[in-house]
Image: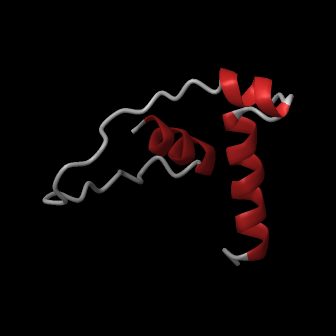
Amino acid sequence: MDLAERIIKLSGKDFLKPDFITGRGIEIKHRNPDVAEMKELLEYELQTSLDEGLKLTYDWYKENVGK
């Protein structure tokens, strides 16, 4: 839900509302992975925040697909 809200805010289309699909059986409701081991093994630190990455992706999509 948090991700959907971020994308709606970024789009400026506050009239959009998430549409939930029911009856799909058991799903993972919450995930909060610990990426500390990945950072250590790959010696890599993310350079882009989630919000910045969403904006870059949204802007690219509008320019290249959403015409």
Way the structure is coloured:
secondary structure
Residue at the farthest front position: 41
x then y, percent, for residue 64: 77, 74
x then y, percent, for residue 2: 45, 34
Residue 39 falls left or right of residue 27: right
The residue lying at 16 percent from left, 55 percent from top is: 25
Figure quadrant of the N terminus: top left
The residue lying at 29 percent from left, 56 percent from top is: 19
Residue 38 falls left or right of residue 20: right
Relative to the observer, which residue lies in front, 18 or 38? 38
**In terms of image quadrants, where is residue 31?**
top left
x then y, percent, for residue 51: 68, 36
Say if 36 sits above or below 24 in the image: above
Figure quadrant of the C terminus: bottom right
Exactly how many numbered labels are in the figure? 0
Relative to the observer, which residue lies in front, 34 or 9? 34
Relative to the observer, which residue lies in front, 10 or 29? 29
Say if 29 sits above or below 11 in the image: above
The residue lying at 36 percent from left, 51 percent from top is: 17
Relative to the observer, which residue lies in front, 51 or 67? 51
The residue lying at 26 percent from left, 48 percent from top is: 27
